[in-house]
Image: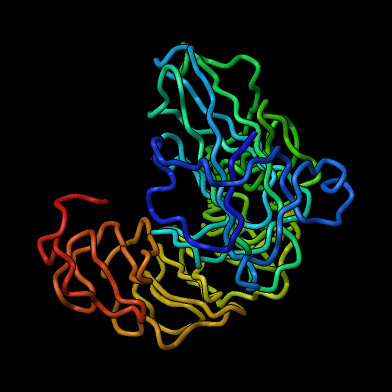
């Protein structure tokens, strides 16, 4: 049983607190939804309104419930099995523990989900429970629409606490045998993992550097990400599934094929996204960071993209062509390891370099949204004394 607020109003920042008085909120049993899809509709216990008390479309719904816990606090994990349409943020005892389909940064009642959720699909989120307490615990959840004219909303969650005391010991049920190195492992919302690296096979399955495995290490044979790239260079494959965004998988690395070289975008099923034809970097791509506007930042060990000089960082337009207005000066003088897009659209860049556009900047620099140097960044020219 939950208390929920579905008036379309903003309950204020205190609504996640354990001592918040939600007695005036409506009570209801999950699954909560306004949805015609049969798999959801038949399991709906509480129908949610789409318009608020003022007659305007509701952007955000708020939910609170309590549960008792009397197990170990040594190394507990929270497992959230949930179905949400479209975006969701979870809070435990007043602190955020997870979010799905929501952008990073401060969440307000007017924020929209970053993309539309797949209809009727359950997600699995696992988090170490650092603020679980013995006794009464409060789980608070906010659900956001992807657009103000959305015709449905869904929320349901099952919460499990795994009071594991042997975390970190070998799990002998997990069996995954790549024939070469793994560079990256991304936990997906369905509980599977996306692996990238220099392997050609896993458990004798041909996967060509990009594979999806389940929680026991078994290869998902329906996903043909690596083989769909038709890679011809078998000696130096280094695929990084750096982000799963809106059902798309961005991969960068050091690979060569007739279809894509060093950077690619795949559909969720592993097929090549032919609508994204990236300009070719002349060296390894170590980071791929999509922006909310559809453009994509790439960085790594290249000095040119589509024949245009670029110092280890560049931005591609939504169709994959080179964004000639971004970082079009000399750029960095050494490799970039990682890139982070910040809430204000500024860009944090780190790696092994000593300058940006000819000015000193050692191993960590912040750029503006247009790719110029942000001189207000506190670390300044001194930077870090080793690779970041």
Which residue sits furthest front? 24
Pick the residue in front: 69 or 203.
69
Above or below: residue 353 compared with residue 310: above
Residue 9 image offset from top left, x and y in percent? 52, 63
Which residue sits furthest bottom? 325
* Residue beneath the point at 41% across and 35% down: 18
Above or below: residue 150 compared with residue 183: below
Which quarter of the rendering shows the N terminus?
top right
Q: In the shown orientation, is residue 344 left or right of residue 84?
A: left
Q: In the shown orientation, is residue 115 left or right of residue 73?
A: right
> Residue 116 falls in which quadrant of the image?
bottom right
Above or below: residue 370 compared with residue 178: below
Q: Is residue 239 visible?
A: no
Residue 135 image offset from top left, x and y in percent? 44, 18
Q: How is the image coloured?
A: rainbow
* Residue beneath the point at 55% across and 22% down: 161
Residue 53 image offset from top left, x and y in percent? 62, 66
* Residue beneath the point at 72% across and 30% down: 218
């Amino acid at each position: 049983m939950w208390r929920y607020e579905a008036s379309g109003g903003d309950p204020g920042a205190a609504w996640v607190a354990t001592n918040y008085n939600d007695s005036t909120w409506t009570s209801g049993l999950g699954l909560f939804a306004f949805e015609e899809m049969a798999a959801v509709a038949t399991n709906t216990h509480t129908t949610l309104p789409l318009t608020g008390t003022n007659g305007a479309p509701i952007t955000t719904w708020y939910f609170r419930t309590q549960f008792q816990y009397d197990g170990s606090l040594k190394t507990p994990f929270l497992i959230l099995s949930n179905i949400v349409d479209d975006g969701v943020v979870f809070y435990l005892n007043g602190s955020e523990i997870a979010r799905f389909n929501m952008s990073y940064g401060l969440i307000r009642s007017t924020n929209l989900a970053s993309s539309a959720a797949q209809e009727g699909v359950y997600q699995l989120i696992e988090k170490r429970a650092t603020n679980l307490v013995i006794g009464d615990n409060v789980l608070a959840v906010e659900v956001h629409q992807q657009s103000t004219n959305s015709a449905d909303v869904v929320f349901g969650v099952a919460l499990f606490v795994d009071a594991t005391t042997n975390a970190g010991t070998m799990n002998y049920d997990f069996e995954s045998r790549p024939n070469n190195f793994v560079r990256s492992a991304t936990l997906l919302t369905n509980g599977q993992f996306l692996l990238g690296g220099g392997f050609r096979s896993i458990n004798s399955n041909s996967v060509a550097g990009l594979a999806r495995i389940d929680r026991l290490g078994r290869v998902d044979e329906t996903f043909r990400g690596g083989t769909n790239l038709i890679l011809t260079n078998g000696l130096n494959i280094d695929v990084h599934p750096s982000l799963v965004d809106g059902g798309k998988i961005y991969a960068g690395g050091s690979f060569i094929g007739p279809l894509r070289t060093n950077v690619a975008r795949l559909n969720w099923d592993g097929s090549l996204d032919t609508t994204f034809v990236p300009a070719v970097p002349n060296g390894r791509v170590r980071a791929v960071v999509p922006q909310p506007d559809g453009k994509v930042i790439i960085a790594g060990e290249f000095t040119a993209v589509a024949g245009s000089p670029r110092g280890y960082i560049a931005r591609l337009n939504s169709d994959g062509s080179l964004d000639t207005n971004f970082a079009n000066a000399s750029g960095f003088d050494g490799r970039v390891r990682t890139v982070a897009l910040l809430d204000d659209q500024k860009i944090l860049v780190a790696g092994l370099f000593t300058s940006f556009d000819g000015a000193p900047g050692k191993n960590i620099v912040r750029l503006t949204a247009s790719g110029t140097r942000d001189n207000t960044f506190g670390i300044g020219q001194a930077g870090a004394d080793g690779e970041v």
